[in-house]
């Protein structure tokens, strides 16, 4: 063990972030041998309780509030330089403080799991060279009875130094290298890989065929003139050529040897996006998504970190990818809810990306056909620069949108006869039809005819969804699965029936009704394997008449050129949503789904079935004017002082026992009441809209302020006081800053 330091002033203390729920840094003594090399952003191995853990040094100091005698030593230094470029590190520190999340967990979230476990940040290359002291001729002479070893030694001598793979390429096997090492003829050297910059990316010829339209040209010109940090909102209708603008903007940066980071909502769903970038640019493109193995993820991190990967495309957590030469960040579909993490470290990748671009002093482009009210508001306040692409590129027309009044119409599995006839017409003309319903499974309700019993989850205050493939009852909130009952558990009656319809029931119905046309169902259940999803998409892209039936998954980013009719079955759910963002999200979904129709030479149409056809929200949308509709919603938000006109933070408390939840939430409310500034509004505590989920009772308190800084200060004090609370057994709490919904 290292002896304790003699004088306090000479002691260097490392303040280390460790992945624990504790909102603090931990002080460790730095052994003298490491004092010169330890610094911010490096990993260290340290004793923590009874374990050894990997932590990240956030700062060094020569003072600790804890007496040196009680401090432990850093056991091992794992890096010789910071794992985070300083601008990224600053962004992460900001995120920890803004979202009030423990810094140790934040920094660890930003790293691939292999680095979290202590693997080397750089892949070292093994090289072989002649031992310094040997005389080549003598050595060759010694090896005259081993011609292969002799030949290898000569080859290495000629090359000066050779990597293992190089040696293998020359036809020498591993055993020969080993023998030369054993005889002390050659030495092993581990070096960092050669990180010469890649040559400038070539631009494929596809580029020259497309001539940008005037709006695209204007947008691009503005983006190109931006210097330093600048946030653009590229608001372009679906198919207006936003991606084309992204690619031209990227080209400028790639030519200047910079890297581009592109964040997209889902990669697995839209493999075309990555393909399109790969086809366009011949530089190294890495894609980061949930399907990667740990080794692949580490590899991608290394390539981005070294600058070798020039384009990084990824989902939410890719916002933390290191870049040695950042040039541009793009957030495609910036309004998409998947950019917000819903558990643990609840960050918004869009907002973190903006902060990061600021810290890197580079350009960021937020693109969408249906921008969030937040972003539209920021553009109105001139915080973002608004760029508009009001028309579809290449002459395709926006499909007209009509609302079909079904208040009086008899429905068959949710379809009016009028809609079924429309579908028939489009199929007969040789086209594809897209039917959108945001409900997977067979039916949302299983009910008993005799006693009205309804199947409910025992862990959640929610109904179980009936699934037909395989037959089961599933909870969509806690993932529990039960066998389908043959009789009512309450009265033993066998007269059980399903109410309402999900994608599986509609698939059955549509297949029977249009029996010569394939029905291609795309939802989370039908696409559990990536291969299956690709098969289904390939089927669609063959362009034969078909009915595409699906959820949200069908709405995002796809190009389905053969689709000429889009039918939205249940717009009413969003119209009357209890959540404050319900209408915004409904409008975004409708416009996005509608955008799949008539993208190529075939004109399309969009039909929305509604029992409330005269609802102003629907008529604004029917005019296909998302901007007007968003303005109207924005006014409502302003009147009710909700985001983006106020800032929210939501505290959730939960426990397996209702009394524990109540006790915890009350203690939190007491603290809040004591420290709350007057202008800060508190709503609650109230039970969460879904009061019980996954076996836990949930209650919440909402805080609201129109001053972000005031809310931030309050939250910081609140969290540190809650940390001092004695929390009832098994009770937990969390904080969601800028929550997307209040469910
Ligand atoms: P968005 O990203 O806005 O949905 P895309 O960039 O994917 O739009 O463009 C939609 C389609 O229009 C693509 O097939 C693209 O190649 C094509 N396109 C884009 N810009 C032009 C243009 N200026 N002229 C002709 N076609 C274009
Ligand atoms: Zn019954
Ligand atoms: Zn459940």
Image (spheres, rainbow, N blue to C red):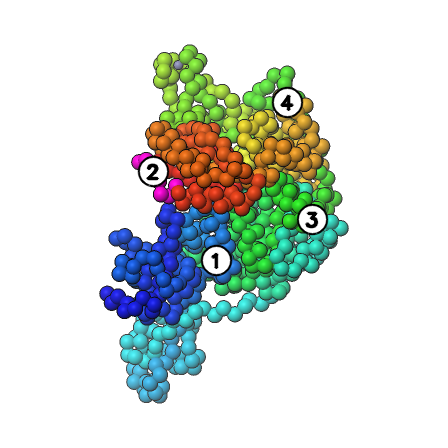
Height in image: 491 above or below 463?
A: above
**Horizontal side, residue 200 vs residue 669: left or right:** right
Residue at image location 54% in from the left, 31% down from the top: 579
Q: Nearer the viewer, mark 3 or mark 4?
A: 3
Please give the residue where the numbered disc 4 appears in the rendered image: 612
Residue 727: image tag: 2
| Residue underneath mark 1 | 89
Q: Nearer the viewer, mark 1 or mark 3?
A: 1
Q: Which residue is mark 3?
A: 387
Nearest the eye: 337 or 484: 337
Figure check: 430 above or below 126: above
Secondary element under disc 1, as helix, strand or loop, is: helix
The CA span between labels 3 and 4 is 34 Å
- Gap between marks 1 and 3, in whole Å? 31 Å
On the picture, is 461 further left or further right than 430? left
Q: Give the mark nearer the N terminus: 1 vs 2.
A: 1
Q: Secondary structure at mark 3?
A: strand
Q: What is the x, y in percent for residue 44?
A: 35, 61
Mark 4 residue crowding within 10 angstroms, few (<14) / some (14–19) / many (20+):
some
Q: Quadrant of residue 76?
A: bottom left
- 11 left or right of 247 in image: left
> Which region is colored magenta?
722-730
Give me the C-alpha separation between circle 1 and circle 4.
51 Å
């Amino acid at each position: 063990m290292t002896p304790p330091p003699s004088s306090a002033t000479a002691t260097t203390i490392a303040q280390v972030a460790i992945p624990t729920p504790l909102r603090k840094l931990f002080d460790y003594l730095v052994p003298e041998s490491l004092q010169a090399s330890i610094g911010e952003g490096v990993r260290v191995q340290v004793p923590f309780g009874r374990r050894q853990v990997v932590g990240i040094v956030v700062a060094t100091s020569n003072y600790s509030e804890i007496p040196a005698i009680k401090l432990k030593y850093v056991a091992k230094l794992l890096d010789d330089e910071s794992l985070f470029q300083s601008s990224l590190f600053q962004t992460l520190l900001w995120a920890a403080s803004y979202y009030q999340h423990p810094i140790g967990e934040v920094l660890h979230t930003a790293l691939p799991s292999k680095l979290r476990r202590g693997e080397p940040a750089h892949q070292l290359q093994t090289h072989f060279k002649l031992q310094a002291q040997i005389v080549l001729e003598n050595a060759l002479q010694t090896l005259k009875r081993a011609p292969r070893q002799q030949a290898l030694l000569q080859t290495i001598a000629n090359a000066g130094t050779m990597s293992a793979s190089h040696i293998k390429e020359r036809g020498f096997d591993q055993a020969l290298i080993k023998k030369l090492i054993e005889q002390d003829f050659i030495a092993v050297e581990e070096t960092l890989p050669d990180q010469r910059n890649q040559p400038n990316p070539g631009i494929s010829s596809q580029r020259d065929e497309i001539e940008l339209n005037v709006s695209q040209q204007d947008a691009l010109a503005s983006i190109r003139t931006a210097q330093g940090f600048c946030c653009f909102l590229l608001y372009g209708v679906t198919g207006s050529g936003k991606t084309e603008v992204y690619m031209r903007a990227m080209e400028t940066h790639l030519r200047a040897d910079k890297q581009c980071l592109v964040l997209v909502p889902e990669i697995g769903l839209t493999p075309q996006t990555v393909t399109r970038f790969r086809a366009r640019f011949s530089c190294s493109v890495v894609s980061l998504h949930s399907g990667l193995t740990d080794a692949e993820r580490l590899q991608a991190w290394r390539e981005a970190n070294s600058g070798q990967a020039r384009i990084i495309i990824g989902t939410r957590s890719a916002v933390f990818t290191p870049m040695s030469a950042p040039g541009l960040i793009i957030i495609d579909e910036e309004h998409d809810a998947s950019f917000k993490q819903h558990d643990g470290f609840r960050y918004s990748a869009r907002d973190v990306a903006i902060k990061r671009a600021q810290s890197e002093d580079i350009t960021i482009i937020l693109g969408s056909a249906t921008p969030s009210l937040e972003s539209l508001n920021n553009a109105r306040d001139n915080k973002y620069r608004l760029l508009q692409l009001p028309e579809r590129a290449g002459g395709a027309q926006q499909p007209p949108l009509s609302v079909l009044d079904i208040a009086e119409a008899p429905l068959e599995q949710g379809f009016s006869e009028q809609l079924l006839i429309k579908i028939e017409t489009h199929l007969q003309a040789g086209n594809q039809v897209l039917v959108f319903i945001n409900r997977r499974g067979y039916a949302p309700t299983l009910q008993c005819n005799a006693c009205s019993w309804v199947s409910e989850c025992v862990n959640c205050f929610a109904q179980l969804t009936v699934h037909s493939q395989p037959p089961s009852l599933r909870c969509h909130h806690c993932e529990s699965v039960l066998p389908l009952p043959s009789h009512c558990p309450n009265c033993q009656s066998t007269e059980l029936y399903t109410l309402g319809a999900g994608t599986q029931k509609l698939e059955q119905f549509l297949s029977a009704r249009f029996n010569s046309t394939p029905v291609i169902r795309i939802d989370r259940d039908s696409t559990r394997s990536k291969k299956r999803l690709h098969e289904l998409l390939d089927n669609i892209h063959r362009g034969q008449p078909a009915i595409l039936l699906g959820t949200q998954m069908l709405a995002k980013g796809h190009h389905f050129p053969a689709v000429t009719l889009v039918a939205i079955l249940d717009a009413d759910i969003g119209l009357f949503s209890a959540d404050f963002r319900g209408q915004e999200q409904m409008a975004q979904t409708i416009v996005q789904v509608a955008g799949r129709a008539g993208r190529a030479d075939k004109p399309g149409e969009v039909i929305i079935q509604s029992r409330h056809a005269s609802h102003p929200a629907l008529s604004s949308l029917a005019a296909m004017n998302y901007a007007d509709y968003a303005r109207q919603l924005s006014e409502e938000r302003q009147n009710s002082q909700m985001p983006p006109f106020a800032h929210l933070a939501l505290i959730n408390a939960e426990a397996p026992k209702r009394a524990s939840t109540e006790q915890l939430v009350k203690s939190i409310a007491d603290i809040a009441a004591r420290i709350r500034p007057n202008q800060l509004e508190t709503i609650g505590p109230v039970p969460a809209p879904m009061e019980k989920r996954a076996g836990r009772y949930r209650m919440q308190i909402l805080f609201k302020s129109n001053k972000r800084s005031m809310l931030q200060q309050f939250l910081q004090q609140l969290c540190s006081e809650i940390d001092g609370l004695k929390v009832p057994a098994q009770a937990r709490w969390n904080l969601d800053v800028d929550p997307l919904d209040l469910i």
